Image (spheres, rainbow, N blue to C red):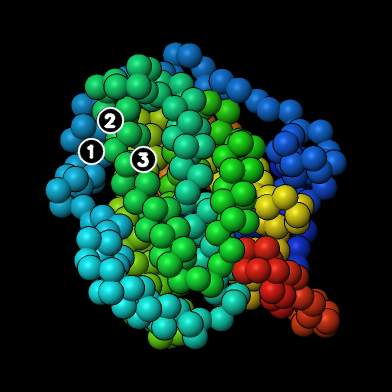
Amino acid sequence: MQFTNTHCLSSRNLSWTPRVHRHRLHPPTSAVRLSPISAVVAAPPKPQKTHSMPAEKQQVFKSLENWATENVLPLLKPVKECWQPQNFLPDPALPLEEFNEQVKVLRERTGELPDEYFVVLVGDMITEDALPTYQTMINTLDGVRDETGASLSPWALWTRAWTAEENRHGDLLRTYLYLSGRVDMLMIERTLQYLIGTGMDPGTENNPYLGFVYTSFQERATFVSHGNTARLAKEGGDPVLARICGTIAADEKRHELAYGRIVEKLLEVDPTGAMLAISDMMKKRITMPAHLMFDGQDPRLFEHFSAVAQRIGVYTADDYADILEALIQRWRLEKLEGLTAEGRRAQDFVCGLAPRIRKLQERADERAKKMEPHGVKFSWIFNKEVTL
């Protein structure tokens, strides 16, 4: 999934402008392209760059097929060894009285969790449930797409099986939220329909170098977010929900390992090309997959959801910097050799970015302390107001 912006990085001058109460990196509200069916006036969509990878570089991915079979596909789990949503939910095959008792116990567990927790959990669930968009994005990447829908290339096998594993996340969270009675499922379902209809453009340009950098970052971000919702559920008295969120986080961690392994290999076989891709995505900012979410009412819904997630500590600007530092360390970017002059400039930029993010965020936090808190109503929780 998962997920806001405390910083805005200009790809022209590489300057950062802190933005208060945001933590998932996304375009300013004025630039957000809402779905045409939303009937909301918005700025024209930004120009989209496509097929930026030179055709000859597709051979890099062709040459790595055996490597992917041996090093990426084993990170998938056989279906019979995978958990399924029903492992965590009331059993509908039970007699009605017993089933109703299980639902009653579930509602008692969730009854003490605060409204802001449900805002974040719903946002995470909607992000997970927009899975068709993410599979579509990966299948636009040149050299690794599923050409037939049933291709036997390791890249296609991974994408389909990854999608199947991810599909359980939204199914489980949505059903749990439905049974909790704490959320307005109609508004959630409308939000999801808007989001899938609108799509996403994370700036990957049909380029698998960019695409796999993006997914490496994204999977770690969802691991962090679900891990924190697990912690808060446990503290709030719902150990089952804590186990659900923790189990989903473990999937995201395994998927991050796979995508990170691909980028690591690209840095080995094409260090400059891979380093430039990492720099490119960081200059653009990692835009979270649900940044165009809309419920038919609030055109700043993602910004408001993100502000709540930042405030309760589910996903913050510090998390963004932590993820960047973790990837720099994993990929050993500071020690990367064999780069061209352009590649070394990209290396310097990426390796020096996290401290800049933290410093500017500290200034934004100081300014935020001087601002009066205000509330926003969320349709997902029956228009109750939550403090940002």
- Circles 2 and 1: CB atoms closer than 8 Å: yes
Residue at the limit of the structure toward the top, as seen here: 56
Q: In this view, does 12 lie above or below 378?
A: above
Q: Earlier in the sequence, mark 1 or mark 3?
A: 1
- Spatial distance from mark 2 to mark 3, Cα to Cα? 10 Å
Residue that mark 2 sits on: 157
Pick out the residue farthest to the left: 80
Q: What element does badge 3 sit on?
A: helix
Looking at the rendered structure, which numbered label has been put on residue 228?
A: none
Q: Name the residue under label 3.
A: 163
Mark found first going from the N terminus, 2 or 3:
2
What element does badge 1 sit on? helix
Categorize mark 3 by other alpha carbons within 10 Å: few (<14), some (14-19), many (20+). Answer: some
The residue closer to the viewer here, 274 or 234, is 234
Whether residue 248 is visible to the viewer of this picture, yes or no, is yes
Q: In this view, does 64 lie to the left or right of 137?
A: left
Which residue appears at 15% of the width and 52% of the height?
81
Rendered image: mark on residue 73: 1
Q: Please, what is the three-letter code of the amino acid marked with disc 1?
A: Leu
**Separation of marks 2 and 1 at Cα, in angstroms:** 8 Å
Residue 300: x percent and y percent? 75, 56
Label tally:
3
Which amino acid type corresponds to the residue marked 2 in the rendered image?
A: Leu
What percent of the width, then of the height, locates residue 24? 62, 58
Q: Position of residue 57 (x, y in %)?
A: 44, 19
Q: In this view, does 240 lie above or below 379?
A: below
